[in-house]
Amino acid sequence: MWTRKTCSESPKRKRPANRARNNKLDPDEIQGGTFTITNFGSFDSLTGTPIINQPQVAILAVGAIRKQPAVLETEMGDVIAIRHIMILSMAYDHRIVDGALAGMFLKKMKELLENFDPNREI
């Protein structure tokens, strides 16, 4: 079974990642994808508008993580607290992906990130 540690430390995964960071990917290494993740946060942007790289189906954009005030519901009523906030935005081809399915995907991503467990096996 793969764990997050095993997956992220795999030499096979590091080589293309390093080439991508250095703009050295070969054209055949970026062909045949169906889903892209882009990181606007690396430029300290909160959000952006991702554009689908056709013929891919969707693209998920990840914004910078910032501390912001947020309303929390507690047993004693609502309180304002400082929370880490990150905006996710997604563009998808409506001919292939139903909007409800895309919304469920973003909701699941939110739940996984808010309840992140580094020891969870994937």
Image (cartoon, rainbow, N blue to C red):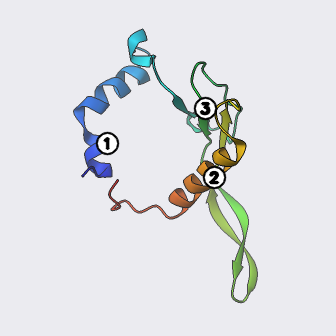
Q: In the figure, 4 relative to 98: above or below? A: below
Q: Badge 2 is on which residue?
A: 104
The amino acid type found where label 3 is placed reads Ala
Which disc number belongs to residue 51?
none
Which of the two residues, 83 or 15, is positioned nearer the viewer here?
Answer: 15
Cα separation, mark 3 vs mark 2, equals 14 Å
Mark closer to the observer (2, 1): 2
Check contact, mark 3 vs mark 2: CB within 8 A. no
Tell me where residue 116 appears, x and y as whole percent. Answer: 46, 61
Residue 111 at x, y percent in the picture: 56, 60
Q: Position of residue 40 (x, y in %)?
A: 61, 34
Q: Looking at the picture, how far across and down is residue 32, in whole percent?
A: 45, 19
Kindly state the secondary structure of the residue where label 3 is placed: strand
Mark pair 1, 3: CA separation: 23 Å
Task: Report the residue marked by disc 3.
Answer: 58
Q: Earlier in the sequence, mark 1 or mark 3?
A: 1
The residue under the point 53% across, 30% down is 36
- Left or right of residue 49, residue 65 in this image: left
Q: CA distance from mark 2 to mark 1?
A: 26 Å
How crowded is the residue under tag 2: few (<14 C-alpha within 10 Å), some, or many (20+)? few
Work out which residue is located at the far top of the displayed protein and give it.
27
Disc 1 marks a residue whose amino acid type is Ser
Instruction: State yes or no: discs 2 and 1 in contact (Cβ < 8 Å).
Output: no
| Sequence-wise first label, 3 or 2 | 3
Q: Which residue is mark 1?
A: 8
